[in-house]
Image (cartoon, rainbow, N blue to C red):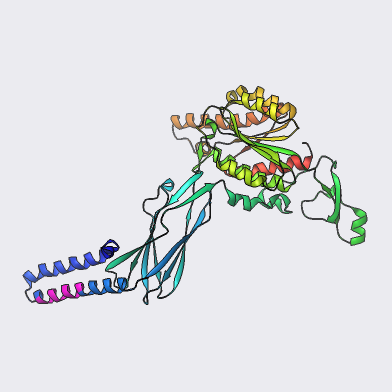
Amino acid sequence: MKLLKSLYINNFFFYALLGVVGLFVLAFIFPALYNATWYVLLMLLTFLFLDVLILFFSKNGIEGIRMMPEKLSNGDENEIKVNIKNYYTFPILVKIIDEIPFQFQVRNFEIKQKIKASTEKEIHYYLRPTERGEYVFGNLNVYVSSPLFLISRRFQFDKERMVPTYPSYIQLRKYSLMAFSNNLFQYGIKKIRRIGHTMEFEQIKEYNQGDDIRTLNWKATAKKNALMVNQFQDEKSQSVYMIIDKGRVMKMPFNGLSLLDYAINATLVLSNVILKKQDKAGLFAFSKKVENRVFAERRASQMHKILETLYNIKTDFFESDFSRLYTDIKKNINQRSLIILYTNFETMDALHRQLPYLKGIAKNHLLVVVFFQNTELNELINKKAENIQEVYDKVIAEKFSFEKRLIVNELKKYGIYSVLTQPENLTLETINKYLEIKARGIL
C-alpha cells in the first residue's frame, strides 16, 4: 500500500502504450506485425517492472532538505535552497514540487534537475513576499525517475514549517554602513554643505573625496605633504521619532507592496542608521489612535524592540486622526526631537485639513513629512495622447503630479521639511534627509 502511494506512472509510459495500440491497429492491415506487437508490449511491461524494482529496491533512494532563513524579508527576493542527495548508483531525473505558502499564489511551481549517481546537488529559487505575517510551507515533494523514465517515486521531506515575514532586513544590511561611507555619492546621496562648525573637534584626517575643502588644515598638510582636514564630531543622543501613518491613505499598492510596508521597511533601516550615529531612535504608528509605541532610546536591545514592533503593526486602514497624533506628541515627547512622519497627501485639500496639526507639531519639534509620488501617473503623463479622452486623462494626471510639488512648497512656508519620493526610493531618500539634518546641525 505504501508503495502504491508513492508510485506515479510517467507520461512517457502512456505514450509508449499508445504506440503499442497503434501497432495493434496496423496489425489488422499487416497481420505479420501481430506477433511482433505482442513482443513489444511484453518488453514494455518488463521495463516497467524493472523500473519499479530499481527505484524501490533502495530503501533510502534520496535525501532532501529545504534550507531557508529563519525569517523572510518583506518586499525582497529571498533565497530558498533545496539540497538533494542521490544514493542511487545511476543518474536520476528529479521533479521538485514545493508546497509554497498560499500568500504567493503560485499554483504551478516545479523544478526539474538531473543529478549524477551518488552525488548531491543544491537547487536555488527565490520568493518575494509582499506582506508581513506567518508563511507556512507544506511538504517538499521530490519525484524521482530512473533513466528508463517510465515511473516516478515520490519522496516527501520537511513537512509543514512556519516562517515569519519581517520588515526588510535585507535592506537593513545593504544600508547599514551607508551613513559612515566616504562614497555616499555612489548611492545618490548628495554632498551636504555644513552651515557652520558648531560641533566638537574630533581629529585631523586625510582628505577624502566629498570632504568640505573649507576644513583643510594647512599646517598639517604641510607637515604630511598630503591634504589633511579637520574632522568634527556630530552631536549625539538626539531623539529621532519615526511616525507611521497606517490609515487608508497608506493602503495604495506599488509593485506589490503597500505604502505602509514601504514605510515600515524604511523605518527599520533608518532606525539602524540613527542608532549607529549615536542618536536615540523611537517610533509609533497611528490611525484612529496612537499605538505600536517605542520610546526613543539608545539601548543595545533597541533595534530588536523596533523590529518586533514593526512586525506586529496591523491596521484596518481607517481614516487617520491627526488631532490625536498632535495631542499624543504634545503629551509624551517633551524634549525637542526630529520627527519623521510617513504619510501621503494626494491633493492640497487633503493637506489643508491636517495642516493645523502639522504646524502645531513643528512649533516644538523639527518635523519632516515624507510622502509619495504616484508613479502610476507617470505612464499617463509620458504617453502621447491620441484622442480627446487621453488628452483629458493626461491633463488630470499632470494636475495631480503638480499638486504634489505644491504641497512641498506649502509645507516649506511653515518651516516643515518634506521628502517627496517614489516608493522604491523611500529608504534612500529618508536616510539622505536624516544625514542632511545631522550635517547641517539644525536639530
Residue segment shown in magenta: 35-45
Left or right of 326: which side holds 247?
left
215 over 157 or under it: above or below: above
Nearer to me, 404 or 248: 248
Q: Position of residue 187 (x, y in %)?
A: 66, 50
347 over 273 or under it: above or below: above
**Looking at the magenta stretch, what is its main secondary structure?**
helix
Residue 75 seen anywhere in this rendered image of the structure: no
Nearer to me, 294 or 80: 294
Question: Which of the 4 image quarters holds residue 6?
Answer: bottom left
Residue 175 seen anywhere in this rendered image of the structure: yes
- Going 28% across and 67% down the picture, which residue do you hit? 151
332 over 168 or under it: above or below: above
Question: Can you say which quadrant of the picture contains the N terminus?
Answer: bottom left
Tell me if residue 185 is in the magenta stretch: no
Nearer to me, 160 or 51: 160
Left or right of 266: which side holds 24?
left
